[in-house]
Amino acid sequence: MAPHHLYGVTDPADSLDAALYRKLALPVLDDISSRGKLPIIVGGSGLYLKFLTHKPADLPSADPDLRTELEALPLAELNRRLEQVDPIEAARIDQNNPRYVQRALEVSLMTGRPVSEQRTSFEAPPESLRGLLLSWDSGTLEKRISRRTSHMLDHGAIEELAALSALGPAVSRAIGIPQLQRLLDGQIDRKTCEEEIVIATRRYAKRQRTWFRREKWLTPVPGDLSEEQMITTARALLRTGP
């Protein structure tokens, strides 16, 4: 069993963003490499992966007071304010994603310049970077999402959330958390909760596919390969490159 890193390193009540994730992950990757081992990054967030693999341009760190103020605002108000200070970014951004809208507004307010004028740019990835992108057809992917959601609800997700005393903004907006919270509050039943989580996950998976298609350093492979086939493919990629 390969050791896993960066699990359980932050409190659910804390804030976390892609820049902080990069700060936490880089020393771990350096330590693994210094021991002659190969770091393997596994995950689903395209933005977090991009921050880690491609050095981002410098943008201001979060201002705790301003972030607290913005986190208290409803999404509609965040979008309204962003449209006022940066209509270009407001038109470009996913206005249904509170994290993106909040961060765009935050940077614009902190710097006094529209974030569209200073949008985060990334350096080219190192030549040694390799990646596999597991892909399924839409029908198979939907079935996997449904099975996974049902498994989560059957194996402690509800109880785990109920046991938490406080939730930070990152956790509060994670797929499944708002739906589970409404279930715990008695606003919806288990069936409705599960259906809403599946729908939200499908939408996220669609955005993921769009995002990762732009990452040309990733090599798509069928997600239903056997473990042996996957290992063989990964080894061949490491030897030859994309």
Image (spheres, rainbow, N blue to C red):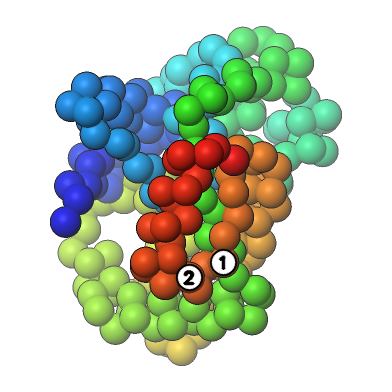
Tell me where residue 214 sits by quadrant: top right
As shown in the figure, which amino acid type bears the numbered disc 1?
Pro
- Give whichever of 98, 220 is nearer the camera: 220
- Residue found 41% across the figure and 48% down from its top: 235
Question: Residue under circle 2?
Answer: 225
10 Å crowding of disc 2: few (<14), some (14-19), many (20+): few
Tell me where residue 149 sits by quadrant: bottom left
158 in relation to 60, above or below: below
**Is 34 on the left or on the right of 213, as rendered?**
left
- Residue found 61% across the figure and 21% down from its top: 124
Figure quadrant of the N terminus:
bottom left
Question: Residue under circle 1?
Answer: 222
Circle 2 — which element? Answer: loop
The label on residue 199 is none
- Give whichever of 230, 152 is nearer the camera: 230
Figure quadrant of the C terminus:
top right
Give the x, y percent position of residue 7.
Answer: 23, 47
Give the x, y percent position of residue 241.
Answer: 54, 37
- Give whichever of 169, 209 is nearer the camera: 209
Give the x, y percent position of residue 138.
Answer: 66, 75
Residue 98 in view in this figure: no
Give the x, y percent position of residue 197.
Answer: 50, 73
Circle 1 — which element? Answer: strand
**Is 43 on the left or on the right of 223, as rendered?**
left
As shown in the figure, which amino acid type bears the numbered disc 2?
Leu
Query: How far apart are the alpha carbons under marks 2 and 1?
Result: 6 Å
Asked if the residues shown at circle 2 and circle 1 are in contact, with their CB atoms under 8 angstroms apart, the answer is: yes
